[in-house]
Amino acid sequence: MSFASDSVGVVTPQKYSFEEPLLLECGRVLPRFDMMVETYGTLNSDHSNAILICHALSGHHHAAGYHHADDKKPGWWDACIGPNKAIDTNKFFVVAFNNIGGCNGSTGPTSPNPENDNLPYGPDFPLVTVRDWIKTQVMLSDRLDIDTWYAVIGGSLGGMQAMQWSIDQPDRLKNCVVVASAPKLSAQNIAFNEVARQSILSDPDFHEGRYLEQDSYPKRGLILARMVGHITYLSDEAMKQKFGRDLKSGKFMYGFDVEFQVESYLRYQGERFSRNFDANTYLIMTKALDYFDPAREYNASLTQALENTKCRFLVISFDTDWRFSPERSEEIVDALITNHKPVTYLEIKAKQGHDSFLFPIPLYVKTLRAFLGGEEHLKNTPVEVV
């Protein structure tokens, strides 16, 4: 199979093992851990062209390219990563990873627990936070011999990680890109996460988190969790254009099986997700979202939390994103402006809702490309709010 000229082509994931103990915010210690990583492009001689890609809740290390010649599905952000794309691998060395607690090769609930006869960790895997992830990403940076990232980029939960990088490691990144994110979850967002978690926890096949030992998994719970999440990721307009009130068979069936196309779509998405994502990982990831609040240690002041940052910022929101609305991005921008930090902000019109950050929307791509292209276009405009 031949790939497009702007594709990174076939990529091979690498596993990085860290044998030193990792103290987590919850007070527990991981005796060791692995991280799955993919890289695209070439690291230059002074290691100054590296970009770190932080993934969202259900994301992973496979951000671009293909895993084999016949692979039909590219990485989750292939639209933006590659030769001559917004994140140009002709210029940059791009690093994507799977966070610990994940289920795509990094140490997580499905990994063997060395303290329990190498049975899967299951519910014994500790809850992790965004700050814990930054610690592991710093360890990965050191392993790759990257002292300073040209940029740390993320959307949604990934944007929270990028923001935490700017606070915890101000000297180790030059640019921070926060897309479709928020400084902390609203009560409504926490509520959505709790409904999703309860659908998993109440599934009879959950077995208190030890379903792998029972050769089972909470399929129904995962399906419901994904359906709830997916509804919140899409805008009303996107669902209207994609499905409307179209009936699958063209007529009412007067029953409770699938009748509307939107019902069919949600069930399909939930079914596919349930086969590919670990339930304990879903619980951990949603809790990491709930716990994120960098202002908590700064007298509940986001302005204080961002006071010592040293990088440039690009903050992007989407007008139809009601899960992480533009107002939440503006909270970040306001705090940065108060601190006289260099920030570019753009609210983009897009019909896809929260999922917009995954699509190659022209203005979005153009803005990202321009911001990463160098500092010339911003050197005379330290604060720009669009």
Image (cartoon, helix red, strand yellow):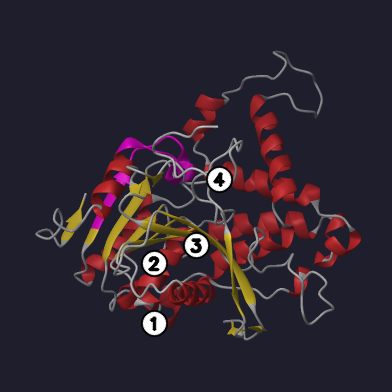
Residue at the far right in the pictured view: 214
Q: Which comes sooner in the sequence, label 4 or label 2? A: 2
Give me the C-alpha separation between circle 4 and circle 1: 31 Å
Name the front one of labels 2 and 1.
Answer: 2
Which residue lies at the image location 33% right of the left edge and 45% below the top edge? 86
Dot 1 falls on a residue whose secondary structure is loop
Which residue is disc 3 drawn over? 185
Dividing the picture into quadrants, the one containing residue 231 is top right
Q: Report, in whole angstroms, how far the alpha carbon at label 2 lies from the one at label 1.
A: 18 Å
Report the residue marked by disc 4: 232
Precedes in sequence: disc 4 or disc 1: 4
**Residue 183 in view in this figure:** no
**Residue type at mark 1?**
Asn
Q: Give the range drawn in magenta.
A: 344-362
On residue 163, the disc is 2
Pointer 2 or 1: first along the chain: 2
Position of 68 relative to 48 (above/below): above
Q: Residue flagged by tag 4: what amino acid is it? A: Thr
If you read the primary sequence from the N terminus, does the residue marked by circle 3 or circle 1 appear first?
3
Q: Where is residue 161 in the image (x, y as percent from the top left)?
A: 45, 66
